[in-house]
Image (tube, grey):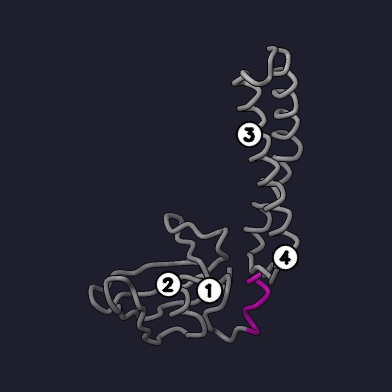
Amino acid sequence: MHQIPMTVNGAEKLRKELEELKTIKRPLMISAIADAREYGDLKENAEYHAAREEQSFCEGRIKELESKLSHAQVIDVTKMSASANGRVVFGSTVTIQSIKNNEKFTYRIVGDDEADFKDHLISINSPMARGLIGKIANVLTVIQTPGGNVEYRIIKVEYI
């Protein structure tokens, strides 16, 4: 498996979820299975089957998180401002303005697992991020969207 780019905040969020699954959720699942076994015949025991299914999901998520964290390339953008030379890079926060209607948007470029458009976190693999990477402030860029090409001016690049 290749390296997975991730911000410091994204890696911390995954670590917290993993810790919660291992220390809280897993013991609850074991207890629920033990309790469900006491209800009798396992073939027709809905509580037992539901608890086993939940345990399977929990264990699968633990494996997935451990794999992602073991392959994570954690990037601290706050330490990159000198080397980035004002360019849009992974982890940077970019303010752009639509040439068409002068609307301003601010996005932070993050890893796939961290992306959340409602929180203005866009995936490094999104068309928007691909159109911004490597650019500097006061440059025009064209972003390919499903509705056609849209032109933006990069207003500000921050490493926060």
Q: Earlier in the sequence, mark 1 or mark 3?
A: 3
Residue 87's tag is none
- Tell me the amino acid under the disc marked 3: Glu
Q: Earlier in the sequence, mark 4 or mark 1?
A: 4
Residue 141 coordinates in the image, percent (x, y): 38, 84
Give the residue at x 68% y 54%: 12
Which residue position holds label 2? 95
Check residue 100 for magenta coloring: no
Residue 114 coordinates in the image, percent (x, y): 56, 59
User: Which tag is nearer the camera, tag 3 or tag 2?
Assistant: 3
Give the residue at x 35% y 78%: 144
Mark 2 and mark 4: span between their CA atoms?
Answer: 30 Å
> Considering the numbered disc 4 on the image, is that residue within a helix, a strand or a loop?
loop
User: Which tag is nearer the camera, tag 1 or tag 3?
Assistant: 3
Tell me whether circle 4 and circle 3 mark residues in contact (CB < 8 Å).
no
Q: Earlier in the sequence, mark 2 or mark 4?
A: 4
Tell me whether circle 4 and circle 1 mark residues in contact (CB < 8 Å).
no
- Tell me the amino acid under the disc marked 2: Thr
Residue 36 coordinates in the image, percent (x, y): 69, 18
Which residue position holds label 4? 71
Q: Is residue 149 above or below residue 91?
A: below
> Considering the numbered disc 2 on the image, is that residue within a helix, a strand or a loop?
strand
| Quadrant of the image containing the N terminus | bottom right
Depth check: give the residue in front, 46 or 151: 46
Q: Earlier in the sequence, mark 1 or mark 2?
A: 2
Which residue position holds label 1? 158
The part of the chain drawn in magenta is 76-83
> Considering the numbered disc 3 on the image, is that residue within a helix, a strand or a loop?
helix
Which residue position holds label 3? 54
Residue 3 coordinates in the image, percent (x, y): 69, 71
Mark 1 and mark 3: span between their CA atoms?
Answer: 42 Å
